[in-house]
Image (tube, helix red, strand yellow):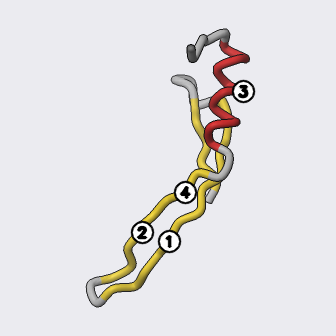
Amino acid sequence: MRWRFLDSAGETLTTSDYEYVLREDPDGLHAYVAVGIDDMQKLRELADRLGVDLG
């Protein structure tokens, strides 16, 4: 799944891809695990573009 991170005006700041482990249980479909594929890289790039020091 691709998530979009938006600013307060609704403009896309960055996107990030995640994989989910889904399981259908007797009471319905549930997500049990979400794994960020590129989230750290994308958020670091965004911080650099915005001049934010992540330390």
The residue at the far front in this view is 55
Q: What SS does tag 3 mark?
A: helix
Q: CA distance from mark 2 to mark 3?
A: 28 Å
* Disc 2 to disc 1: CB gap under 8 Å: yes
Q: Is residue 12 visible?
A: no
Badge 2 or badge 1: first in the primary sequence: 1
Q: Is residue 42 above or below residue 20?
A: above
Q: What SS does tag 1 mark?
A: strand
The residue at the far left in this view is 27
Q: Residue 45: which numbered mark, if any?
A: 3
Q: Is residue 49 above or below residue 43?
A: above
> In this orientation, which residue lies closer to the viewer: 1 or 47?
47
Specify the quadrant of the image occupied by residue 26. Answer: bottom left
> In this orientation, which residue lies closer to the viewer: 45 or 8?
45
Q: Which residue is mark 2?
A: 31
Q: Which residue is mark 4?
A: 35
The residue at the far bottom in this view is 26
> In this orientation, which residue lies closer to the viewer: 40 or 27?
40
Q: Residue 35: x, y in percent?
A: 55, 57
Q: CA distance from mark 4 to mark 2?
A: 11 Å
Q: Residue at x 60, y 56 (%)?
A: 18
Sort mark 4 into few (<14), some (14-19) or many (20+) by Cα contacts within 10 Å: few
